Image (cartoon, rainbow, N blue to C red):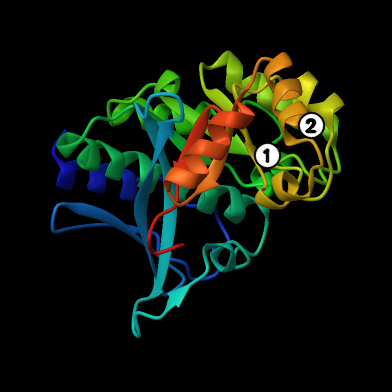
Amino acid sequence: MPLSEFVRYLNAQKAPTGSGGRSTTPFVAENGQVYVHFAKLRLESFYSPIVAIADGELHGHAAGLNAFGIANRQLLEPDAVFVLPSDDAEFSYLDRLVRTLHALNYLIYAQRRSRGSLLLRVHPRHVASVSADHGLAFEEVLRTCGLMPAQITLEIEIDGVDDQAQLVGAVANYKSRGYGIAVGRFGRREVNFALLQEIAPAIVKLDPLLLAATPQPQRLVDRLHELGAQVMIEGADTAARRERAQVLGVDLLQVSNPLRD
């Protein structure tokens, strides 16, 4: 489907009621890319490569969000965008909107590069606010643009989750549809191996503060491997970081985007 036609298709999808004046035709195609307009902001995608520590081979990419004021082009922190929705329905709409933006732009981005798996963040509030069939609506969008859930890894943070049963059920739903699961910023506030074991993610991305504060980081990495997960860290791709990661047995490095370093 041509890009302009696909944007028209996406804009024809129904937005939640009570959207507080948000754009009902949020997707904009311009200069071979797609942007989203939401609440007087322009949302753009960028991608950070994920490489295997052992051999430097490309594993995939992690999608990131840049947000600018439409009028002044002032850069905002991505988390600031997610305080704007007025209720859970609009929040879920925005979260899915951002993931759709990243998936569509990735098709364009990957035409010029090796693709690999795409890592997409799912906001914890989205996981909590959707009662059932997690991943179904997004799967329908993915299939329309030629992607399958098996090509997507969803990154979910589990620190401080109030309803662990809801989280476990959501992850089971995502897995049943073929999505990979990654746990993001593990250990930012707590180290919950019991919940991690129940979720059984394919990837665990360590919070940098946890890695720095752990007296025996290699034992931490070993335990995560025992749970069947690959261990990922995030940061600049330097020889020193790769060497330390290799000593610890870390599997993957998400290379920080220059705009966010």
Horizontal relation, residue 108 to residue 19: left or right: left
Vertical relation: 176 (above or below) 115? above
Q: Could you give the CA–CA distance between mark 1 and mark 2, rounded to whole angstroms?
A: 8 Å
Residue 116 location, quadrant: top left
SS for callout 2: helix
Horizontal relation, residue 131 to residue 155: left or right: right
Read off the residue under disc 1. 127
Horizontal relation, residue 229 to residue 103: left or right: right
Residue, x 71% and y 52% (percent of image)?
Answer: 209
Vertical relation: 21 (above or below) 245? below
Residue, x 24% and y 30% (percent of image)?
Answer: 114
Residue neighbourhood size for the residue with mark 1, other residues' Cα within 10 Å, grouped as few (<14), some (14–19), many (≥20): many
Vertical relation: 67 (above or below) 212? below
- Asked whether residue 155 is in view, the answer is yes
SS for callout 1: helix
Residue 54 location, quadrant: top left
- Asked whether residue 14 is in view, the answer is no
Q: Nearer the viewer, residue 188 or 223?
A: 223
Horizontal relation, residue 217 to residue 258: left or right: right
Task: Check disc 1 and give the amino acid type.
Answer: Val
Image coordinates for residue 208, horizontal then vertical, percent: 66, 50
Give the label on residue 166, or none: 2
Marks 1 and 2 in Cβ contact (< 8 Å): yes
Residue 144 location, quadrant: top left
